[in-house]
Amino acid sequence: MSDPVKIAFERNILTLPIADLLPTKALPAGVRESVKYRRIAASVAEVGLIEPLSIARQKSGEYLLLDGHMRLDALRFLGATDAPCVVADDDESFTYNKRVNRLATIQEHYMIVRALERGVPEEKLARALNVDVKVIRQRRHLLAGISREVAELLKDKPVGHHAFQKLRKMKPIRQLEVAELMVSANNYTVSYAKALLATSKPSDLHKPDELKKATGLSSEQMSRLEREMASVSEEYKELEVSYGDDMLVLVVAAGFLERLLSRPEIEGFLAGRHPEFLENFRAIVQATSLDQSAAVA
């Protein structure tokens, strides 16, 4: 029987004095001029604090702020004295942020659509998100021309709005192929979407003539680019299949080398007789430890 799921936060949201909250970091200089800060400040001023601050209890009776430093600063700037807070069990921000899923582009689209359907004016929504009304209208129709399968595949992926513009130029089958390639490569940039669009066959596009004008490539150049992209995709899939086994072998080998180098007599022997081997062994151990740290982060 599996263990029960442990709740990471207290169930009740507390409204606490801002003076009792202890920040864990200082905001960098010039942060108030950033787009992200202005968007948060506009949202707080227009509709209030949507996401409570994350805090941890301290024995002194004060509370350690784990997440929400920009929101806290915006509240102070607007003259607020209290803030809604959710209390976490762990008192460090790394654990908290591991449990948070950031809003993806398609999820933002659904949020905007639901808000508009419930009667929220476009102008108020634009002020809350600190964007132009035109942006709200564009994001409202984000999935226009996008197949349901693609929307489901990319619903939690960080795909940019401009990448969807490229997908919209393709027919549904090609859209799905491109979306699967983006997921496999873990690359959701508009540049990658544009490259895949440029290598699409004319029969896979809604308006192939427009693509030819946009890229400025001849038919022969397009064909060569298609062959090269197909070759790269095949090679990537082959590497993807063997990656897991290769990484397992590397981790096991690095663990053995680490234990080997932990013995002073062996390390001394290699340093005196085979310094080049010692340097390579240390590089392997270090590279593997860095990969594992990145994966945890």
Image (tube, rainbow, N blue to C red):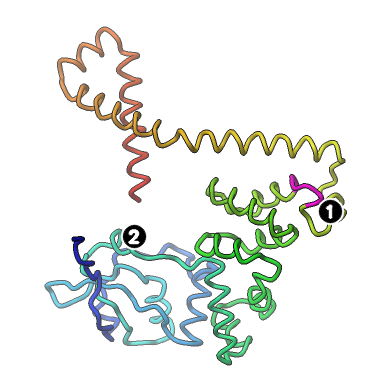
Quarter of the image holding residue 235?
top right
Crowd band around label 1 with a 10 angstrom C-alpha radius: few (<14), some (14–19), many (20+): some
Residue receiving disc 2: 98
Tell me where residue 292 appears, x and y as whole percent. Answer: 33, 41
Q: Please provide the residue range marked out in magenta.
A: 198-203
Q: What element carries label 2?
A: helix
Q: Is residue 214 or residue 168 the one in the foreground?
A: 168
Tell me where residue 8 appears, x and y as whole percent. Answer: 24, 69
Crowd band around label 2 with a 10 angstrom C-alpha radius: few (<14), some (14–19), many (20+): few
Tell me where residue 15 appears, x and y as whole percent. Answer: 28, 86
Q: Is mark 1 on a helix, strand or loop?
A: helix
- Is 262 drawn above or below residue 21 in the view shown? above
Q: Residue furthest front?
A: 1
- How many callouts does the rendering have? 2
Q: Is residue 280 or residue 12 the one in the foreground?
A: 12
The amino acid type, in three-letter code, at marker 2 is: Lys
Q: Residue furthest bottom?
A: 119
Among numbered discs 2 and 1, the one appearing first in the sequence: 2
Q: Residue furthest top?
A: 273
Tell me where residue 66 appears, x and y as whole percent. Answer: 29, 67
Mark toward the viewer: 2 or 1: 1
The residue at 82%/37% (across/down) is: 221
Would residue 230 appear left or right of 105 to someone viewing this image?
right
Residue receiving disc 1: 208
The residue at 47%/66% (across/down) is: 31
The residue at 52%/74% (across/down) is: 38
Q: Does the magenta stretch include residue 197?
A: no
The amino acid type, in three-letter code, at marker 1 is: Pro
Would residue 292 appear left or right of 127 to someone viewing this image?
left
